[in-house]
Image (tube, helix red, strand yellow):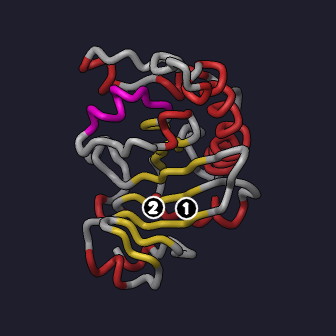
């Protein structure tokens, strides 16, 4: 799939709130907030993570060919702060290193499990709120996958984010708030 910058910077929230979400808007003296750096990170993220995921899932038998959707990628600092709840100040989204994706033809656990076993390089994968269920036109507030790539540091951190205590308890790992780090599989049978 061809890299299309628009897919990685488009934000309905930014549009609705009148927030500038163009890479470089926050630059100041910080090299890591300059447009070239952010766009370069988005291209690497696309090449190493999103393109392989799209190629695999969009070519499965019975697939519509458009089963992976980007819901959030690059976020300016203003957009990141405007979210409910607000994104963390050091979010990889701000530097163009992270993307949130949905799978319209199956559970988000399918993306998580495929990515952790098939992608050679990535920084972090989070199975986000699986209790919200699979994306559908009637359920737009659904589970998603957060995946990041950092050309300088890809430790392959696998995490669960959930409001359900029983999901966290099903995994042995380091628990911090809504996150359990160190999971090895997204177990759909727990939902």
- The quadrant of the picture occupied by the C terminus is bottom left
Which residue is most to the front? 29
* Residue highlighted by disc 1: 112
**Residue appearing at x 28%, y 37% in the figure:** 83
**Residue appearing at x 60%, y 39% in the figure:** 65
Query: CB of mark 1 within 8 Å of CB of mark 2?
Result: yes
Mark positioned earlier in the residue sequence (1 or 2) = 1
Residue 174 sits in quarter: bottom left
Q: Position of residue 96 (x, y in %)?
A: 56, 34
Label 1 crowd bin: few (<14), some (14–19), many (20+), radius 10 Å: many
**Residue appearing at x 28%, y 47% in the figure:** 141
Q: Is residue 130 above or below residue 17?
A: below
Provide the major secondary structure of the magenta segment.
helix
**Mark 1 to mark 2: distance in Å?**
7 Å
* Residue highlighted by disc 2: 127
Report the span colored magenta.
74-83
Q: Position of residue 14 (x, y in %)?
A: 33, 22
Query: Mark number for residue 88?
Result: none
**Residue appearing at x 38%, y 66% in the figure:** 179
């Amino acid at each position: 799939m061809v890299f299309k910058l628009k897919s990685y910077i488009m934000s309905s929230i930014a549009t609705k709130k009148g927030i500038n979400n163009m890479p470089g808007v926050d630059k100041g003296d910080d090299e890591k907030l300059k447009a070239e750096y952010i766009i370069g990170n988005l291209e690497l993220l696309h090449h190493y993570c999103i393109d392989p995921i799209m190629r695999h899932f969009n070519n499965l038998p019975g697939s519509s060919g458009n089963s992976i959707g980007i819901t959030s990628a690059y976020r300016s600092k203003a957009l990141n702060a405007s979210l409910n709840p607000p994104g963390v100040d050091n979010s990889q989204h701000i530097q163009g290193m992270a993307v949130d994706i949905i799978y319209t033809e199956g559970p988000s656990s399918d993306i998580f499990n495929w990515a952790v076993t098939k992608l050679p390089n990535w920084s972090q994968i989070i199975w986000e709120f699986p209790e919200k269920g699979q994306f559908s036109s009637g359920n737009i507030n659904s589970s998603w996958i957060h995946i990041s790539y950092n050309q300088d540091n890809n430790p392959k951190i696998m995490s669960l984010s959930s409001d359900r205590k029983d999901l966290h308890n099903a995994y042995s790992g380091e628990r911090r708030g809504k996150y359990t780090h160190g999971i090895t599989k997204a177990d759909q049978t727990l939902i």
